[in-house]
Structures are given as structure tokens and as C-alpha cells.
Amino acid sequence: MTERIGIVATVQTKYEESKPRLHPSELLCEVVEEVMSETGLTFTRDGTGLEDSVTCCSDHWDGQIGSSKNAQDVAGGDLRESDNVSTGGANAFFLAVARLLSGSCDTILVTAHCKESQGQVGLIENMGFDPIYHRMLGLDFLSAAALQANRYMHKYAITSEQCAKVVVKNRGNAKNNPFSQAPLDLTVDDVLNSPVLAFPLKVLEVKPVSDGACAMILATESRAKKLTDKPVWVKGIANCYDSYYLGDRDLADCAALTNAAHRAYRMAEITNPRKEIDVVELSEYYSYQELLWLEGLGFCNKGEGGKLIDSGVTGMDRELPVNPSGGLLSGVPTMVDGLSRIAEAALQLKGEGGARQISGARTALAHSVMGVAGQMHFATILEK
Amino acid sequence: MARRVAIVGIGQTPHKSRMPELDAGEMINVAVRAALEDAQLSIREIDQVLLSNMEHFEGNYFVEGMFSDSVGSYLKPGLKTQVMGTTGASMVTTAWYFVASGLFDTVLTVTYQKQHEGQSGPVLQSAAEPSYDRVLTGHSAMYIFASLAQHYMAETGCRPEHAAMVRVKAADNGRRNPFAHLKLELTVEDVLNSRVLVWPLRLLDICPTSAGACALVLASEERVRKITNKPVWIRDHIAVHQEGFTLSVMHYYPDPFPRETTREVASKKLYARNGITDPAKEIDVFEIYEPSTYGELQYMEDLGICGKGEAWKLVEKGATTLEGEVPMNPSGGVLSANAIGDCAMVRVAEAALQVRGDAGEHQIARKVNTAMAHGFGGRGYTTLHLLSKTL
């Protein structure tokens, strides 16, 4: 990157199973107003305020074509530049970084919102399958993930207990996160004895339905330094698509994630992620994904995700804390998942993690995923 | 500082009413191959691949993933922006940002739609805000455009014949464009005798529903020199969106608090930034997103191409034809092809073809150095791209 881009402020709502009293625009308005009051920036037309915004929402989840207007109404899009990304909040962040680097603006607002409670998760995800061959099979992301879990567990002898440990850890971490939807004290047996949704995935191994929003303000280096005394710098950023058809991929591997991670590491000049990264916030929609994604990110060799969780190094006070926020398994909506990972990673680097703070965190990785069985991955490296 | 960015590859599928012979992925692939061939690049030389449409029309979710193999994004970066009718233009702008920022050197950006795989009326109705507008109005785009047309006629003295002349010009141009959907032989009487859909809009006053795809390759200045000797530079671009919670503030209906449209705001800013004082003279050709005949007239005025109430007079004089002083929509415009997701990108693609002098039979008579593409989207979105042969 030619210039440093800084995260100036981040705000999240509390994530909840349902927020029936809030219109999607009102939900977003909460975080936009808060993030603006934190920085003192306003929507002006004279170049002194917030100049640009990139929102993220999905027509499917908002149940409305042109759902972008739900976001742009409140994100200051009126009579000025703005755009809307539907590939998840992390990619809205990516476009915002590009807009800043192009020199078109000095400050930019990034938002993501989603009310999963208003849609039928399985029906919407079913529309993500090609309409000719796969859709009528009734697949959704859960059943596709179950295929992936089976393949991964079979190929590398990952056990149900190892997957369950991810749930125990993340739901436990969530107790320290005031935004978290569903913190819970669990044992491995609780997870293993919960009802099966799609074999081998049990109800506690699946991200719960969630509503919420996240907003943040990014700025060029000179503006960022003026706006905050604790900027968080974007050192590396990348994303990557895998092939669409499940049969074209080995679901036990994640080539797209490895590709994205390598490019993000190269930008950030990271050669040994295990040593150089202090904290990881990643998007695990299902328990086994945390193990598989950690392999893809190069924190251990292929097939060793199970050993990694057994060794306990991904716990709160260990060498490689993963999801101190509680992760997606504790409840964060799709579309918001990636931006909230970035917000959590930024809080850690600012030292504002409260009870979930990892001491001495200087470099963090935030990850996001979209699509069937993790078809598209995003990774960014943030630094204090 | 932004790096300079040019369009180095242009590809389109022919647009059609229905395209059952190609599924969406195959159709996308046709446009992608055409753009890569035009740029003389292989997909290996592309750093980033962007794909978008308006997902509700076909009822697919996460299409940028679903068609990753067809568009060529396998093991490549990319993302999707989605902002209603301006989606196609937003995807050009997004590619511009990723190149100008220095993050990527070559970006392939692709948009498509197969409107016949859905029901456009109900889909567009879902644009209305669900709690208030949707139950009250049951409106679709047609009613909005009809209301605007009534206003335009009342304010300017324009008559239905003038709208019909816009249509005849679009048909004449569309017949010369191999990628246009409608290639009709029309007279003013034919238009005036077509059936009324919502007064004053007749069947031939309104754009069709089409299937098609469009792809562009954008490259950074250093790469451009190696790829082509006919680059089309994106000199400037602007996107202006408008708040649109309820109908009255969208200028769709008489507004108790009238203010400038996004077209006026965007074009004034763009012209000022580029030292353009007389756009009709300084810009050689316009591709504007006209959803109806009356729309073309009104947008010409909003974009400052002529004065208020003057557009229909220009049309009456024949000034907007291929040989005229202010050629409008030499491609035949949206009236000749409307695959809604790709419409705003096709405007940029066609403007670029005019700049290159590669538009074939619909190349305008005068030499083109500068062209402007306009995109329109629901809730009052406006995009403008200013293209030129030289930097």
C-alpha cells in the first residue's frame, strides 16, 4: 500500500436474536450516530466532515430490492458520493480502503447491518445454490457445511470433541463481551448432547440467528492522527474466491483462504503468522470452521486444527488467542460478521477490549467468509 | 494521488428479450471472453474480478460466488456492489478505485441480467419501503415515470409527438447496433398508436425488459501503454445518491419542498471540476440512461446539455441523431436494450466505443474526443463517467 490507512473509531450494537422494534435504517442509525459523535465528524458538504461512505447490506436479508437506500439514508449518502457492497461488511471495508488510497477522500464511513430475524435463513441461503442443478435438492449453507464438516473430519481425523471445544471456548469468551448475544457456560458434553441439525453439526455448533449493525470511520494517515490518538493501521488486506461447485473443491482444504492470507501477509511483511500475530478474530459460522480456517491462515499445518484446539493455545491467555469476542458462534449476523471482526480486532489493538482484552496485542488478524462452505475469504492485518 | 485509469477492453453479449440458450453463467462468460479478446489479455493477466447484477430479478443470492467459474474469479480477489439501476456504473467506479488506489493493475468488471427469469413488476415494487410505501402505493417504476412525464409536458409544452421522435431516433440507432435488443422500424405514428400503459406512457415510450451482459477491463496507466494504443481514459466520475425514505422526497411526485435533482448536483460538480462550461459543445456524445422517452428529454435538461424546456425542441430539429449537433444515445439507449443490472455499464461501454471510433454503424458523424455516460437508478441515484481519448 502506498499510504497508511487508519481506523479511527468503531461502534457495534449489542447483537440480539431479534430486534423487532427497529427498522433496518433505525438499527444502523444507532451506530452511525455513535461513531460520528465519537469522532466529532458530521455530514457536511464543504470538505470538513465525512466525505464518503461505503455501506453493506443485502437485498435478500432486507427483503427489498435496492436495500442500499436503507443504509445510505442514514450513512450520509444524500447528495454526495457513496456506494453499497453486498459481499459482506469486510469487503465494504476493502472498498473503503481503496477509496481512501485513491486520494478521492480523507475520511470515510463504513457500515454493515442485517436483521436475520426478518428473513428465513434456510430459504435465503437456498437461493445461493444454482437454480438448475442444486437448488431443488433443498441445500442451504448449513447442509453444505455439514458436508464440509464430514469431509474435513474424515480426511484429517478431527473429532467431534475437538469441534465442541471451539464452542465451549467461544461461548465462554463471549461472557467478557458486552455486545455479545449469547454468552454461555458450556461443557464439551453439553455441545455433543445438543440436538443434531445436520449431521455432524449440532445446534450448539451453529451460529445462532442474530440482528445487529456495525459502523466505523477510516481516514488517511494525516487525518487519522488528528482524529484519534489511538489509530489502528491497515497493514495488509486481501480477499479471494474459490470455485463455486462443491464437487470442484476438496472441502477439507480452503485454497481461497490460503491465497488471501498469503497476499495479506505479504503486504504486511509477515513471514511467520504464528509468531507475529497476537490476536485473531475470525468468522466461524460453524464450530469446525474455526479449526479449518486456522489451517488455511497458516497458523498450523493442514489437518492440525484439532491438535491446535487440544493444546489450548487459542484460549484467552495463551499465545494465539482466537475470537476473544466470542466469535460468530456467540451471535453476529451475516453481512456484519466481517466488519465486526475488524472492529473487535481494532478494540484489542487500542487496548479497549475491557474484560476480553489480550494484554500487549500489537498485531491482529481479522477474517471474514461468504458463500457456500466458505467459498470466499477475506483477511486483513491490523497494527497498533 | 490517484493513478490514471483507462478502459482497455470492452465486451457485450447481444441483448435479447429471452436467452434460454445460455444460462446466466454462460451468458456472463460470452461478455467476459469478448472483453478479454478486445484487450488481448488472458484471464491470468487480470488481478481482480468484479461481478454484479440486481439479485432479486432472477432470485439468486451471492451471484458473485455462484458464477465465479464463469466470470473467471477462481482464486482471484473481487467483490460486488449493488445500488439499483446504477449498479453497472458503480461497478465501473469500483474497478476505478481499485486501480487508482494502486491495489491492482488490471481489473475485469462485469454486470448482467436475465430479466425474463423473473417478474420485473413485482420485483421493482419490492423497492418500495415495506412498512409505509409498499402497502400504500403498490407502485412500480412505470407509474413513477408516467407521473414525471405528465409534469414534464405540463411545464415545458412538450407534446407526445416529441417523445415519439425520441423513440424513432432510438429505434434508428438500435437497428445499427449489433448488441441492441430492439431493432424496430418505427414512425412517429407507430409510437403514438401503440397502446397506453400508464398515461401518457405508451408501450413504445418505455424501455423493454432484456437479457444480456457487459464486461470492461480497466488498467493502470503503466499497464495501459503495454496493452493498447487506443485507451479510453476515465477522466472523472461522480456518483450522487439521494435520500429516499418516502416517495415525496424522491421527486417522483410533486414535491412540496423542491430542490435540485441528483442529476443537477452531479453534473454541475463534474463540469466544474473539469472546466466544462458548455457541455453540449465540449462533450462530443452522450450515452444517458433513459428509462422512457420523456426521461431522455428531462435528463438532457437536468444534465445541463440544454436549457429547461429546450430538449424537445432539439429533438424536433433532429439535433440528437447520429449526425446532429448533440448526439444522444447512438447505441439506441435503454429504450433499445434494458438488462437492468448491466444498463449503466453499457452506457460507459458504448461511450467508450464512440471515443475509440469503434462503434461501427452507430459511430456518430463527428470526431469524438470526449464522451459522457450517465446512469440512473431508483431512489434518485445518478452516476456520471467522463471519458476521453487523451489525458
Image (cartoon, helix red, strand yellow):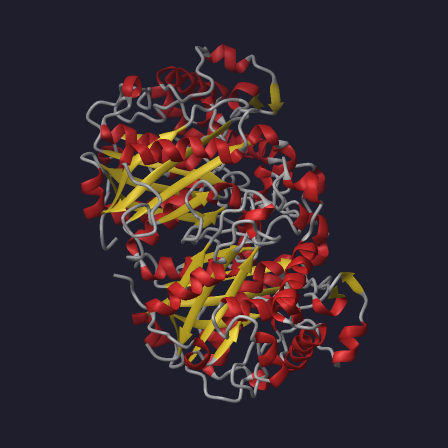
From the viewer's side, name the closer residue of B206 and B96. Answer: B206
Asked if one can make out residue A158 in the rendered structure from this viewpoint, the answer is no
**Residue that appears at 69% across and 60% down:** B146
Left or right: where A153 falls relative to A352: right
So how many labels did they put on this image? 0
**Residue that appears at 61% across and 20% down:** A196
**Residue that appears at 53% across and 28% down:** A22
Asked if one can make out residue A52 in the rendered structure from this viewpoint, the answer is yes
Tell me where residue B52 appears, x and y as whole percent: 54, 55
From the viewer's side, name the closer residue of B50 and B97. Answer: B97
Q: Quadrant of the C terminus of chain A?
A: top left
**Residue that appears at 40% across and 22% down:** A179
Tell me where residue A347 appears, x and y as whole percent: 29, 29
Left or right: where A73 falls relative to A263: right
Left or right: where B195 falls relative to A251: right
Left or right: where A39 falls relative to A20: left
